[in-house]
Image (cartoon, rainbow, N blue to C red):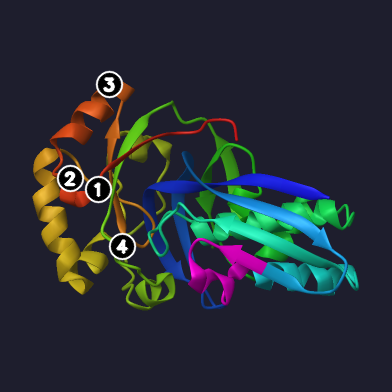
């Protein structure tokens, strides 16, 4: 049996860091929105107990979060002697704040749950996935979401269709390292959707990223001349928000080619 999935990226429309938790994670608020940028994952059963990954990025064949979630699923479900051939066509940049690894992990959970006939509920998969990564439960949810807690409190929301122009700096940023550099702003209070619509919140990692990576600061300063520039996740990718494809394509044409801008559309129901 062979299964193939699109594994979508996300944007953080804002991130607010509230406080550090006793478990070492941080409480935060964010809006996660899926975009039409995706990896392609293919899963096929094999007769032995090996799990083999082939990818257009060779480093991902040796070290991959997909292996972690599959091994956890095997352990919890007690399945034995079941192997997989996995093909990963990677299009989402790595360490870019676009959630590619978490999306791949969620896709793998969905695939093995079906392939191995484990038949666990989606809520079970969400709880299980939290031991691997805080963003994975979102990718096991439908649509876009208002996120709270460490990423485990997910409230579905409607976000209007929009277009984005992405600019990735070809810098791989460690999410763990960025969280280690967070200094809690005691004036940070919980925000609400009105604060977002009034542009009263941004990405709390922006200044950390710009001060840590001079290349990104230079890039940010130059690109800001073309419009209001936003940061997704803990960095690596900046984005402009556009209300139409026409606007996005026009903006895309004005940005120097050396920045490799990319036009993507928001996804509403996936």
Q: Nearer the viewer, mark 3 or mark 1?
A: 1
Q: Is residue 244 visible?
A: no
Disc 2 versus disc 4: distance between alpha carbons? 26 Å
* Figure quadrant of residue 197: top left
Residue at screen point 78% across, 49% down: 2
Disc 4 versus disc 3: distance between alpha carbons? 30 Å
Q: Are marks 1 and 2 in contact (CB under 8 Å)?
A: yes
Which of the two labelled residues, at mark 3 and mark 2, occupies the earlier sequence position? 3
Image quadrant where one finds the C terminus = top right
Q: Is residue 169 above or below residue 172?
A: above
Which of the two labelled residues, at mark 4 and mark 3, occupies the earlier sequence position? 4
Residue at screen point 12% across, 39% down: 226
Residue at screen point 10% across, 54% down: 221
The label number, if any, that marks residue 205 in the structure image = 4
The label number, if any, that marks residue 260 in the structure image = 1
Q: Which residues are magenta?
A: 53-65
Name the residue tied to disc 2. 257
Q: Are marks 3 and 2 in contact (CB under 8 Å)?
A: no
Q: Are marks 4 and 3 in contact (CB under 8 Å)?
A: no
Which of the two labelled residues, at mark 3 and mark 1, occupies the earlier sequence position? 3
Q: Secondary structure at mark 1?
A: loop
Q: Nearer the viewer, mark 4 or mark 1?
A: 1
Which of the two labelled residues, at mark 4 and mark 1, occupies the earlier sequence position? 4
């Amino acid at each position: 049996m062979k299964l193939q999935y699109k594994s979508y990226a996300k944007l953080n429309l804002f991130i607010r860091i509230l406080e550090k938790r006793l478990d070492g994670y941080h409480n935060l608020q964010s809006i996660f929105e899926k975009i039409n940028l995706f990896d392609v994952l293919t899963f096929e059963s094999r007769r032995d107990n090996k799990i083999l990954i082939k990818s257009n990025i060779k480093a991902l064949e040796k070290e991959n979060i997909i292996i972690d979630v599959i091994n956890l699923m095997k352990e919890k479900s007690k399945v034995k002697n079941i192997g997989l051939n996995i093909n990963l066509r990677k299009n989402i940049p790595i360490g870019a704040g676009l959630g590619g690894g978490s999306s791949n992990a969620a896709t793998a959970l969905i695939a093995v749950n079906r392939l191995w006939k484990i038949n666990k509920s989606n809520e079970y998969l969400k709880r299980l996935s939290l031991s691997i990564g805080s963003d994975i439960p979102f990718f096991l949810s439908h649509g876009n979401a208002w996120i709270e807690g460490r990423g485990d409190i997910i409230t579905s929301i409607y976000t209007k269709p929009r277009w984005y122009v992405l600019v990735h700096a070809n810098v791989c940023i460690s999410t763990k390292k960025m969280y280690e550099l967070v200094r809690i702003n005691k004036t940070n209070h919980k925000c609400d959707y009105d604060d977002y619509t009034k542009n009263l919140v941004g990405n709390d990692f922006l200044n950390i990223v710009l001060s840590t990576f001079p290349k990104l600061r230079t890039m940010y300063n130059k690109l800001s001349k073309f419009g209001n520039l936003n940061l997704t996740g803990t960095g690596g990718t900046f984005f402009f928000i556009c209300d139409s494809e026409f606007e996005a394509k026009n903006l895309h044409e004005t940005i120097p080619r050396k920045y490799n801008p990319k036009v993507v559309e928001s996804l509403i129901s996936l």
